[in-house]
Amino acid sequence: MSFRPLLPCWLLALSILGCAAPKALAQDKPVKQKPQVILYKDMVSAQWDTVKCVKNVIKLNPLMFFRGEIPIHYERALSPRLSAELGIGFTWRDYLNLSFDGGGDADDYGGGTDIIARPSYHLGLRWYHQVDFEPQGWYNQLEFAHVEYIKDIKEVQSDGSIGTTKYRDEKIYNDIRLLAGYQLLSASSNWLFDIYGGVGLRSRDLNLVKETLVLTRTRFDPGPNTCIRRNRATISCRRSSWA
C-alpha cells in the first residue's frame, strides 16, 4: 500500500503567513470615523464666545420724547438666544398726555407750571426665537419700568396774577411689560431697526392738581354781562392702584 505525500512544508508555511498578513495590516490601519451631522445651533453655541460679532447694542427711541421720557437703552447678548437690556433716562414734558382715565391734568404750557426732570429706569430680559451669532430676529421680552412725572403748579391769585404758593403734581408708575418685536442689524453699518409692542400691568401712585374756571362778577362790571376770570383751584388727591 502506498500513500501520496502531503503538501510540502514550505507551501503550508506560506499559506499561514498569507492569512496572518492581512490581519496585521488591518490592525495597523486607522479606522475611518463616520461623518457626523452638526446642527447649526450647536455650531453657533460652540463658536459664540470665539467669533467676533455684535454683542453690545446702544439704542435711543426718539418717539419716547413725545411721551415725556428720554431713555437710553443698552442691550448685552448673554447667549445666542438670551440678552439683557438696561435703560436709564429722565422724564420731561408729556406732549401727548394720553390717559385712559380721562386725563384732566393742569395746563403744562400755562404760566406758573414748572416741569421737574426725574430719572426713569428700565430692566428686561429678551429671548430670541432663533439662534444667531448676533442679537437679531423675532423676540419676546419681559421688562420692568419705573417712570415719574412731576411738576410744580403755582396758585393763581384772585386778581389773575400768579402767586408763590406751589402745589406738587406727581405721577409715579411701576410697570411690568410683556413685549414682542423684531430687531434687525444692518449688514453694512452699525445701525439697527427694532420695532416692538405689547401689554403691561401698571401700579399708579398719583397726586393730581386739578384746574378749574371760576366765573365771578365784580362791582366794576360795566354791564349786565358776567365777567369771566380764570382761576386755578388746586385739589390734591393721592391714590395708588393697579391698571
Image (tube, rainbow, N blue to C red):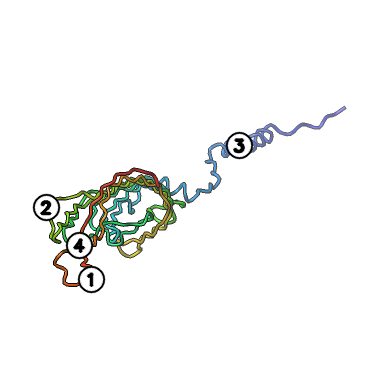
Within-10-Å neighbours for mark 3: few <14, some 14–19, many 20+: few
Which kind of residue does numbered mark 1 sit on? Asn
Q: Along the polypeptide, which appears first: circle 3 or circle 2?
A: 3
Which kind of residue does numbered mark 3 sit on? Lys
The label on residue 23 is: 3
Q: Along the polypeptide, which appears first: circle 1 or circle 3?
A: 3
Image coordinates of residue 209 in percent, x first then y, are 25, 52
Residue 80 seen from this side = no
Instruction: From the viewer's side, name the closer residue of 46 and 72.
Output: 72
C-alpha gap between disc 4 and disc 3 = 100 Å
Within-10-Å neighbours for mark 4: few <14, some 14–19, many 20+: few
Q: Is residue 38 above or below residue 184?
A: above
C-alpha gap between disc 3 and disc 2 = 106 Å
C-alpha gap between disc 2 and disc 1 = 31 Å
Image coordinates of residue 139 in percent, x first then y, are 43, 53
Place residue 192 in its image quadrant. bottom left
Foreground label between 1 and 4:
1
Q: Secondary structure at mark 2?
A: strand
Residue drawn 88% across the image and 27% down it = 1
Within-10-Å neighbours for mark 2: few <14, some 14–19, many 20+: few
Q: Along the polypeptide, which appears first: circle 4 or circle 3?
A: 3
Which kind of residue does numbered mark 2 sit on? Thr
From the image, tell me which residue sits under label 4: 110
Which kind of residue does numbered mark 4 sit on? Gly
Q: Along the polypeptide, which appears first: circle 4 or circle 2?
A: 4
Residue 108 seen from this side = yes
From the image, tell me which residue sits under label 1: 225
From the image, tell me which residue sits under label 2: 164
C-alpha gap between disc 1 and disc 3 = 123 Å
Foreground label between 1 and 3:
1
The label on residue 84 is: none
Q: Secondary structure at mark 1?
A: loop
